[in-house]
Amino acid sequence: MARGGFPGGMGGANMNNLLKQAQKMQKQMEDMQKELENKSFEASVGGGAVTAVVNGKNEILDIKIKPEVVDPDDVEMLQDLVLSACNQALKMAQDETSASMKKVTGGMGMPGMF
């Protein structure tokens, strides 16, 4: 065995192949991230009373509230509906991001990436 732990000098070829694969995966992840950032996710609650739209960057793009649910005597209910719609839309975006990244990484389990 050659010094350095790789028999027969094969380490360099294996390392180059590994680096190429890593670069390809990085490019795929960047492309997927850009695609997800431009995608929108919509969630409605309260039978469609409140709808929230977010993008893949976890930014809230739009909130729609049906006028009939605006009750000055029950502002807390409206606040809860808005909060719930936003959280559901953000979860949809996060779930799709995770699923897409698992496809790219082959489920390698890279903690802290997404």
Image (spheres, grey):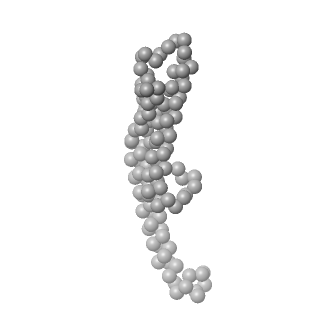
Residue found at x 40% / y 52%: 31
User: Residue placed farthest to the front in the image?
Assistant: 47
The answer to whether residue 7 shows anywhere in this view is: yes
1 relative to 97, above or below: below
Q: Position of residue 21 (x, y in %)?
A: 45, 66
The quadrant where residue 3 appears: bottom right
Indicate the position of residue 44 as horizontal and vertical percent values: 44, 30
* Residue under the point 54% across and 21% down: 77
Q: Which residue corresponds to the image point at 43% horizontal and 49% vertical from the top-left? A: 33
Q: Quadrant of residue 6?
A: bottom right
In the image, residue 16 lies at what x, y percent?
47, 73
Whether residue 65 is situated above or below residue 94 in the rendered picture: above
Residue 59 visible in the picture: no
Q: Residue at x 56, y 20 (%)?
A: 76
Quadrant of the drawing holding the N terminus? bottom right
Horizontal relation, residue 3 to residue 98: left or right: right
Question: Number of callouts in the render?
Answer: 0
Determine whether, in the image, residue 3 is placed left or right of residue 33.
right
Is 32 or 107 nearer to us in this picture? 107
Q: Percent x, y for residue 40? A: 40, 38
